[in-house]
Image (cartoon, rainbow, N blue to C red):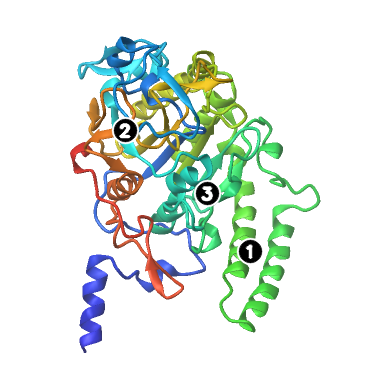
Amino acid sequence: MGAIGLAQVFAQTGTLRAAAELDSTQPLAVRPPQFSGRAKRVIHFFLNGGPSHVDTFDPKPALAKYDGQPLPFENLRTERKTGAAFASPFPFTKHGQSGLEISSLFPHLAQCADDLCVIRSMQANLPNHEPSLMLMNCGDQVMSRPSVGSWITYGLGTENQNLPGFIAMCPGGYPIKGAENWQSGFLPGIYQGTFIDSQHTKIEKLIEHIRNHNADLKLQRRQLDLLQQFNARHQAARGEDANLESRIQSFELAFRMQMEAADAFDLSQEPPALREAYGQHVHGRQTLIARRLLERGVRYLQLWHGESQPWDHHDGLRDGHKKLATEIDRPIGALIKDLKQRGLFDDTLIIIGGEFGRTPVAELVKGKPGGGRDHNPYGFAVVLAGGGVKGGTAYGATDEFGFKAAENIVTVHDLHATILHLLGFDHEKLTYRYAGRDFRLTDVHGNVVKEILA
């Protein structure tokens, strides 16, 4: 009787999942969150390589004052040798009724200033791309853990059984660490992100083998049913096998995608004016495709930017950052306006940021100050919009020069806890039992940043 009572308590707190919710035959079925969340879906623009916060969303007038001079404090820890203060070549101005300051790199995004929440006090742990990518995407910089998108898809399922719940779009191939950025880890494989090389325009190249030229859908269904019978017999003789279960679910999803994926990726259905608003280039196209996927129930989309030429400007920052910002500024601004018009903005959480920031001082190139900045995990910025965050807000602060988070510090675990909260989950109770313990995205860390909630 005591166990029955305890199970009831756990069910009320969301610690245990109902058996129907964990039905392995429908692992992507829609599941309710633990409480009413403001967001239903997420789109994450990942600025690969580490964009400079002091050149984008965190203005530092003191850098202009000390430009070319040593900064007046010690303990400036960087990977490489650095020189004097490096003033931003991009002027900051106030925008919207909120007066949120944004640099000249993002004129279209600046038009949406009153919808943006800029966290200026982010902190990571290490000044290296690989561990910082894993920390931002998977919550752990060393161990192999499920990605944020996998946790969210595990928690909520997807509203369209004919499409993956989690899609990662990266034009030109894989980023650093490859598929580990959207891995399912110890979660069932069906929750792993589906990779799409969005540099292509034809559906057959965007999604390999989406068409079967040798069999119609009826014959494919018969073939698949027979294959699933063999797999079920194989599985019954060997007990639960996560890899086999993932294979079975992948076959089913691939079959269902033939009926809907082609339509979702067909931009010819969009008005020419809207396609022009997003931009007639790869990042404009993939952002518009992302909006179409969000409309069709995909739960988590990650759009990579800076795959072939990352935001990793140790030199040539002026031209490099300008080029990259021009590629995504217009698409993101168009997306925000488009989602608003369609009534999807308030329950879609938009995330914009990279794995860390960059130093306020110039990096030395061949012993002399160059035109770039080194990696900086000690203080950087991430931008949020929609999905229940407070627009027109700048939260937290780095020090006078932008090197280190100094006020209302937000760790990556705090960010993850806040994302889950906006989706209706207590980050301490969305767990999965593996290797004898209950794991969660935030491990044993993380606090919800309540001050940025609308």
Tell me the quadrant of the picture where the N terminus can be found: bottom left
Q: Nearer the viewer, residue 80 or 97?
A: 80
**Percent position of residue 164, x then y:** 53, 50
Graded by Cα atoms within 10 Å as few (under 14), some (14 to 19) or many (20 or more), the crowding at tag 1 reads some
How would you rate the neighbour count of disc 2 (Cα within 10 Å): few for under 14, some for 14-19, many for 20 or more?
Answer: many
Q: CA distance from mark 1 to mark 2?
A: 45 Å
Residue 90, given in percent of the width and then of the height, sits at: 40, 11
Position of residue 369 relative to residue 354, above or below, is above
Label 3 secondary element = helix
Task: Give the quarter of the image for residue 393.
Answer: top left
Name which residue lies at 71% across and 39% down. 204
Residue located beneath label 3 in the image: 182
**Near-viewer residue (417 or 309):** 309
**What is the three-letter code of the residue carrying label 3?**
Trp
Task: Tell me if 357 is positioned left or right of 193 in this view.
Answer: left
Above or below, 211 relative to 1: above
Q: Amino acid at mark 2?
A: Lys
Instruction: Using the rendered view, name the quadrant where residue 200 is placed.
Output: top right
Amino acid at dot 1: Arg
Q: Which residue is mark 1?
A: 247
Q: Position of residue 345 (x, y in %)?
A: 33, 33
- Residue beneath disc 2: 404
